[in-house]
């Protein structure tokens, strides 16, 4: 059962004895079709549920595509024009949801970049209990958004929640409507998300910190660098590739925030915390206006792509000043 | 601990100078500060989970009592009995759905990713760079763009409102291919070469040499896929309509709209949805955390 058993040469020979063939042209590597046969199961799924939808979505967005109606007339860019036309019916709701996604992303990404880095720096030492703490901080992440959101809606309940109760004990206002008023609802959504995903980013940071060669710190110390200078000149440059990665995945995750809003605030108060992805899912899959919803998803994606380019540009390798 | 801080303030400073970034320093204010920070943060992370479990064993009234109690009095399993038997919220059925879907999804992810990753890591063919580049590029495609068209594709296939809809469409894992390819590249080629000289076919080398050598990586990917699928929320909410076909996260949403302030019931439901993943995490956290930390390393 162990890897060594299988790797033992005698074993391999035994297991493969029956298939021995005369070697063609020295050692036959593989036929031309072999790589594609290995790739085919993956590529079928990938083509059908990743590549095709990207193209199909663009096609849908050019039609008045209502699942419940028979005709799906081609309307060109009308769905897109409507999204940018203040007098159209979709304009207000769509941009409200884009604003909600924007607020959430702006508020959550910096926190999800900095706090996990601080936690990782504190953990980047050998000390008893390190793995235990790492596991504790990571634990909420394995729960999934539904459990986390249902749990926090309880903890944030106006009247019966732990949060208001303990704030009261500390002498702070104890009647904040954490889930039904803004800006408190934003604090809730961001706070819950930080609690939920802090461990994920910390673990990635921690692995990257441990990859920074110790000698670089030694050298910096020899040169008389203090702790801040070491952080600035050794740690941050060493983390650069991971910083880009974490920024990208955190923005992508925050811009796709759905469950927290769906379960904790139900998009409220009004529609203030209804995010773009929430609006797209409701428009397309509840009201069946799929053309409009597909157009929305392309506009959101365009925003995210521009943002990605900006981030790559910001993190580009600079000549040392 | 505080006495220690006050009496020997210089010692740790001296030691710190000597120690390099990784080596721990024992005793001293820095250590006390670090543990204080870690413990406070640890409590912030654990106490909500503990309160969730505690509340699930409370009566309806105690779940909304002020001040909140940390020990159920009386201790009751009433909430569990209610949600497990209520007709509109078949929690046991949801549990079975989630488990079956997660296992099937994980198996498909591991099988398809491993085969593809093997071809990309070890075989030379025209178009390899293109295929790999295309797969990696989709790591940064926002999933939102797939929702509407995939709903229609799944509808065309007749999978709406079936568990297949939550098992298959999300199974083309770009991360899985990337992760396993990296792992395969790290395995010395001599082992395959030996098998090849013995006349083994690519399929035999893959099944009998590569896969057994890659067990830790396969286990990590299987676990991550299992967790992702178990916790998936948006997609099941929209593609599963029948109450008895929900997965647990989608079911929790149903449970919440049916019992908005029955927090005893909601916490019991949340515990049912958490216990399997928390157990997996407690026993296999090494694999899970390794997998996540590896995902940040550049290729």
Image (cartoon, coloured by chain):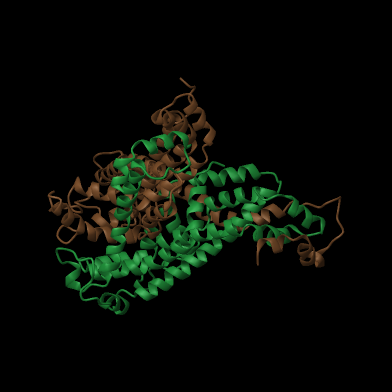
> Could you say which quadrant of the image residue A206 lies in?
top left
**Above or below, comparing residue B93 to residue A317 in the picture:** below
Name the residue located 40 percent from the left edge and 61 percent from the top edge.
B231
Q: Is residue B20 left or right of residue A291?
A: right
Chain identifier of the green chain: B
Q: Is residue B169 visible?
A: no
In the current view of this chain or complex, which residue is farthest to the top? A321
**Drawing shade for chain A:** brown
Q: Nearer the viewer, residue B57 or B123?
A: B57
Total numbered labels placed on residues in the image: 0
**Above or below, comparing residue B20 to residue A265 in the picture:** above
Q: Is residue B198 left or right of residue A262?
A: right
Q: Nearer the viewer, residue B157 or B246?
A: B246
Q: Position of residue A237 (x, y in %)?
A: 47, 31
Q: Position of residue A198 (x, y in %)?
A: 37, 48
* Quadrant the C terminus of chain B occupies: top right
Name the residue located 52 percent from the left edge and 36 percent from the top edge.
A214
Q: Nearer the viewer, residue B68 or A245?
A: B68
Q: Position of residue B98 (x, y in %)?
A: 42, 68
Q: Nearer the viewer, residue A225 or A281?
A: A225
Q: Is residue B101 visible?
A: yes
Q: Position of residue A184 (x, y in %)?
A: 19, 48
> Could you say which quadrant of the image residue B73 lies in?
bottom left
């Amino acid at each position: 059962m162990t890897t060594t058993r299988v790797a033992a040469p005698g074993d391999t020979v035994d297991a493969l004895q029956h298939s021995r063939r005369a070697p063609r042209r020295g050692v036959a590597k593989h036929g031309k079709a072999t790589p594609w046969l290995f790739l085919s199961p993956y590529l079928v799924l990938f083509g059908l549920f990743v590549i095709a939808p990207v193209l199909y979505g663009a096609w849908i967005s050019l039609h008045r595509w209502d699942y419940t109606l028979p005709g799906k007339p081609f309307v060109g860019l009308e769905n897109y024009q409507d999204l940018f036309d203040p007098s159209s019916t979709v304009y207000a709701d769509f941009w409200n949801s884009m604003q909600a996604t924007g607020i959430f992303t702006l508020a959550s990404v910096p926190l999800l970049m900095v706090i996990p880095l601080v936690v990782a720096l504190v953990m980047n030492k050998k000390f008893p209990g390190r793995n235990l703490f790492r596991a504790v901080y990571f634990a909420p992440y394995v729960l999934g958004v539904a459990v986390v959101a249902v749990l926090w809606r309880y903890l944030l309940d106006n009247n019966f929640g732990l949060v208001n109760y303990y704030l009261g004990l500390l002498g702070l206002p104890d009647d904040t409507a954490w889930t039904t008023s803004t800006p408190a609802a934003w604090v809730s959504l961001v706070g819950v998300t930080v609690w939920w995903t802090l461990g994920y980013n910390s673990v990635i940071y921690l692995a990257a910190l441990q990859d920074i060669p110790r000698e670089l710190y030694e050298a910096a110390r020899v040169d008389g660098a203090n702790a801040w200078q070491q952080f600035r000149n050794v740690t941050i440059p060493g983390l650069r590739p991971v910083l880009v990665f974490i920024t990208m995945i955190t923005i992508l995750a925050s811009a796709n925030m759905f469950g927290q809003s769906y379960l904790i605030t139900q998009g409220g108060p009004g529609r203030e915390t209804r995010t773009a992805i929430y609006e797209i899912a409701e428009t397309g899959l509840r009201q069946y206006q799929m053309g409009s919803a597909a157009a929305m998803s392309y506009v959101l994606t365009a925003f995210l792509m521009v943002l990605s380019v900006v981030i790559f540009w910001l993190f580009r390798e600079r000549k040392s000043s | 601990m505080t006495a220690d801080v006050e009496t020997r303030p210089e010692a740790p400073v001296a030691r710190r100078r000597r120690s390099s970034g990784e080596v721990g320093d024992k005793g001293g204010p820095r250590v006390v500060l670090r543990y204080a920070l870690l413990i406070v943060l640890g409590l912030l992370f654990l106490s909500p989970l503990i309160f969730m479990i505690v509340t699930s064993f409370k009566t309806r009234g105690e779940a909304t009592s002020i001040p909140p109690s940390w020990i159920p009095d009386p201790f009751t399993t009433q909430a569990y009995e209610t949600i497990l038997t209520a007709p509109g919220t078949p929690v046991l059925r949801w549990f079975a759905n989630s488990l079956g879907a997660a296992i099937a999804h994980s198996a498909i992810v591991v099988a398809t990713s491993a085969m593809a990753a093997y071809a990309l890591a070890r075989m030379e063919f025209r178009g390899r760079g293109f295929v790999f580049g295309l797969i990696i590029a989709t790591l940064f495609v926002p999933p939102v763009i797939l929702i509407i068209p995939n709903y229609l594709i799944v509808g065309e296939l007749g999978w709406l409102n079936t568990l297949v809809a939550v098992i298959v469409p999300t199974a083309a894992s770009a991360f899985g291919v990337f992760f396993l390819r990296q792992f395969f590249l790290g395995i010395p080629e001599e082992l395959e070469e030996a098998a090849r000289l013995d006349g083994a076919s690519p399929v035999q080398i893959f099944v009998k040499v590569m896969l057994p050598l890659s067990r830790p990586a396969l286990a990590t990917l299987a676990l991550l896929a299992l967790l992702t699928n178990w916790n998936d929320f948006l997609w099941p909410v929209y593609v599963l309509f029948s109450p008895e076909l929900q997965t647990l996260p989608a079911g929790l949403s149903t449970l919440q709209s049916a019992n908005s302030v029955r927090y005893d019931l909601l916490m019991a439901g949340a515990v049912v949805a958490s216990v399997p993943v928390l157990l997996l995490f407690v026993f296999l956290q090494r694999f899970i955390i390794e997998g996540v930390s590896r995902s940040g390393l550049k290729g």
